[in-house]
Image (cartoon, rainbow, N blue to C red):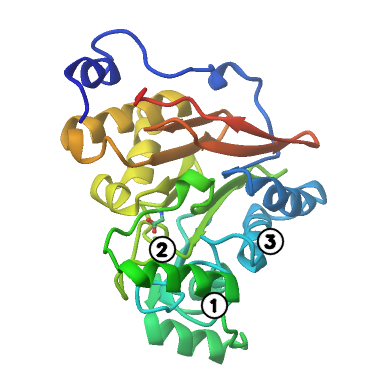
Amino acid sequence: MLSRKNFLRALGLVGVAGMVKDLDASPRRKPLVVSTWDFGLAANAAAWKVLQSGGYALDAVEAGVAIPEADPKITSVGYGGYPDRDGRVTLDSCIMDEAWNCGSVACLEHIMHPSAVARRVMDKTPHVMLVGDGALKFALEQGFSKTDLLTPEAEQAWKQWLEKSEYKPEPNWELNHDTIGMLAIDQQQRLCGICTTSGQAWKMHGRVGDSPVIGAGLYVDGEVGAATCSGLGEEMIRSAASHSIVEAMRSGMKPQKACEDVMKRILKKRGNKVSKTQVCFLAVDIHGNVGAYSLLKGFEYAITHDGRNEVLQAPYMLNE
Ligand code: GLY
């Protein structure tokens, strides 16, 4: 249970929880790429190659997240992702550019790179979102090949879960393995983002989280800033978290303050319903200022600029 003192402290009514580093005081950085969790390092390196050679931020984020999507050791994104409770690996992803163009796929099976399919939805259809069989049909029409995404390791973990079959789907954030959200600004100051995941392990078949939902797991306004999320997707959908963060930046807040403001709102509305789960935000404004914040300790993000590629701990709201 969230104690009254911690609840008030978290809402800023007494003291300050967590270690807060003033990221907004950092010098402005462009080009820039940031992404969630430590596996963002390798993803950022791939995105940085595109940015460094003068490429488009949208191409950079797509190239970046292709790395964890293809990595069988990462159990929360793409190939090797943990399956749903029926043993099916279903992927969610979305992509958004600086001019509100966006594409998304949800509950997509058998395709290793859902983000590349989301990009095709954006570029080749009049729609924003395709789901399930329709998304798969479109991907195959576009020339993507079918892959068995369930690795032997993921299958073994699922079979172990089946022994109890306790329906308590949880993001595996404790292992630093959840959604990868990535935001990039290129040399022409174009700001783009992407968000991709296999979602909660052992979820109900058909469950879709925040990651493919524009405004929840990702939102980009090329004149203001962008935000992406990781953690328990249902909370990000309820709060339209990424959109809320960008709107807070539009009203004048720096990214760090905007993340903290939206987190306070979630805690105020949801209280003890969220106090034991993880909610993580990452945001940038068009000037290259960065904000990162999580509900609980443990959220890390990767930041790459001026050739430096490092993982930083995000400040957090609750001590318990
Ligand atoms: N944030 C990933 C999910 O909840 O599906």
Residue at 75%, 54% (x, y): give it.
46
* Residue 26 picture location, percent across and down: 63, 19
Q: Left or right: where does residue 261 sit relative to residue 256?
A: left
The amino acid at mark 3 is Ile
The amino acid at mark 2 is Ala
Residue at 47%, 65% (x, y): give it.
198
**Labelled pair 1, 3 in contact (Cβ < 8 Å):** no
Q: Left or right: where does residue 23 sit relative to residue 54?
A: left
Report, in whole angstroms, how far the alpha carbon at label 1 lies from the one at label 2.
12 Å
Could you say which quadrant of the image residue 257 lies in?
A: top left
Q: Residues within 10 Å of mark 2 (few under 14, many from 20)?
A: many
Q: Quadrant of the C terminus?
A: top left
User: Ligand 1 shows up in which quadrant of the image?
Assistant: bottom left
**Labelled pair 2, 3 in contact (Cβ < 8 Å):** no
Q: Is mark 1 within 8 Å of ligand 1?
A: no
Q: Which is nearer the eye, 230 or 88?
A: 88
Q: Quadrant of the N terminus?
A: top left
Which residue is disc 3 drawn over?
67
Q: Secondary structure at mark 2?
A: loop
Q: How many marks?
A: 3
Q: Could you say which disc has been placed on residue 201 in the image?
A: 2
Instruction: Give the vertical position of 210 relative to 38 (above or below).
Output: below
Q: Secondary structure at mark 1?
A: loop
Report, in whole angstroms, how far the alpha carbon at label 1 lies from the one at label 3.
17 Å
Q: Secondary structure at mark 3?
A: helix
Residue 44 can be seen in this image = yes
